[in-house]
Image: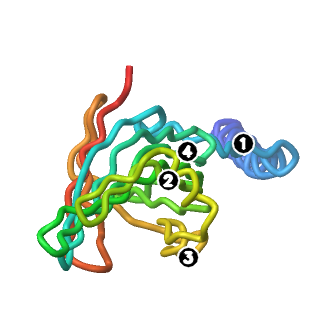
Amino acid sequence: MMRAIYERLLNWKKQLSFVVVLSLVLPLTTWWYPRLVSDERTDDIVGRWSFDYATTQSGLTVEIKGKTTYYSTGKYNVIGNIIYKWLQDDHQNFITYRTDGAGSWKVYDKNLIISLEDMKSIPIKIKFSGKECSDAQIAMLRNFDLPSPEKTMAKGKSQSYVIKEQSGKQINLEADNPYGDNFEIIMVKDE
């Protein structure tokens, strides 16, 4: 009987010793060999997406059509056309800009958050008072300090989009518009 109690006690001490040693070894191992945290994102949004949308506010319509490439590093590039349209003196006027931008992105909960870090744009087509400018006139106008999309935005400006619906080939976003009503953007993944 004494021997059985002694063996149980000995087993209990061995088990306790094993638990204590294990509880010391695991934290020390993770301290010596920490898991490397990767900046790489694996979200479904990584890839090249096409978009085409328009919004109107106070008589000015802004149409944007282009492609955005979201990289797994959290960076993105966007290229496309921005068209500003307005009616003045019964004439439909417009300025079309070719734009090229770059920034960073992340998905937080159900929101795609982008920060535009740099953007360049040049006018490629202009129609004013019923007259469309020639390519030579537009080339000459590029030498002047014309208003352009990047001049209306603060550098590094962030924008939030609510991800309303997402599949492998399409993402429906709702743009959080600080200047008016929110609007929908549909992005389609390029093959």
Crowd band around label 1 with a 10 angstrom C-alpha radius: few (<14), some (14–19), many (20+): few
Residue type at mark 4: give it. Asn
> What separation in Å lies between label 4 and label 1 (alpha carbons)?
72 Å
> What separation in Å lies between label 4 and label 3 (alpha carbons)?
18 Å
Q: At which x and y percent is residue 108?
A: 43, 59
Label 4–label 3 contact, CB within 8 A = no
Q: Is residue 111 left or right of residue 30?
A: left
* Foreground of the two, 141 or 122: 141
Residue at 30% over, 41% down? 187
Crowd band around label 4 with a 10 angstrom C-alpha radius: few (<14), some (14–19), many (20+): some
* Foreground of the two, 137 or 57: 137
Q: At which x and y percent is residue 156?
A: 59, 69
Numbered badge on residue 46: none
Numbered badge on residue 154: 3
Residue type at mark 2: give it. Gln
Which quadrant is the C terminus positioned in? top left
> What separation in Å lies between label 2 and label 3 (alpha carbons)?
29 Å
Residue type at mark 1: give it. Tyr
- Mark 2 or mark 4: which is in front? 2
* Foreground of the two, 169 or 139: 139
Of pointers 3 and 1, the one earlier in the residue sequence:
1
- Mark 3 or mark 1: which is in front? 3
Judging by the rendered image, the residue that carries numbered circle 1 is 6
- Mark 2 or mark 3: which is in front? 2
- Eyeballing the image, is 96 above or below 6? below
Judging by the rendered image, the residue that carries numbered circle 4 is 77
